[in-house]
Image: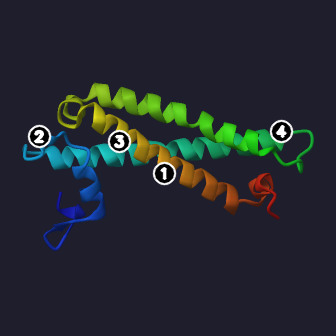
Amino acid sequence: MTIFQEGGSASWLGGLAEGLIRAELRDAPGAHDTAVSWLLTGLVIAALATGAMVLFKKFRKDRALLKDKPWSLAEVFGYLAVGLFPIFAVLLAVYYLSLDFTNILGVQGLFKGVACAWLLYVVLMVGNDLIWPWSRTDYRLR
């Protein structure tokens, strides 16, 4: 994919994608494109999961009896951890439904892609919590 190349050298996304490909298939035709597609799939699923979890958290806070009561940090991080399972389940389903992902990336590519998606999800969730005033109070920030 020429979108992810800068002047003949691979971009940061392309470099990250190279680490997902099984060693014996690095020179296979289409392997790089498949790895980039896997990364983008993980990023999209993580962003969608973040949006769903933010909406669910907003709904729970709006329905609470004590609207200004902050959640404990255990609740905040427990809630954040709950969103990791759907990301893993959806990525696992996508991985096994595509023979390209299964054959070219291997199991290590699956787990590296899941780790990238989880990292993006956690960064987006914490960032979202710090942006919105109704959620910022959970970190004892005003």
Q: Quadrant of residue 45?
A: top left
Residue 67 percent location from the top left of the image:
88, 47
Is 127 in front, or is 107?
A: 107
Q: Which residue is mark 1?
A: 120
Q: Which residue is mark 3?
A: 112
Q: Which amino acid is tagged 2? A: Leu
Q: Which residue is mark 4?
A: 63
Q: Quadrant of residue 123?
A: bottom right
Q: Residue furthest front?
A: 23
Task: Kindly report which numbered mark, 1 or 2, lies closer to the viewer in this rendering.
Answer: 2
Q: Which amino acid is tagged 1? A: Leu
* Earlier sequence position, callout 1 versus callout 3: 3
* Earlier sequence position, callout 2 versus callout 3: 2
Q: Which residue is mark 2?
A: 25
Q: Is residue 122 left or right of residue 35?
A: right
Task: Kindly report which numbered mark, 3 or 4, lies closer to the viewer in this rendering.
Answer: 3
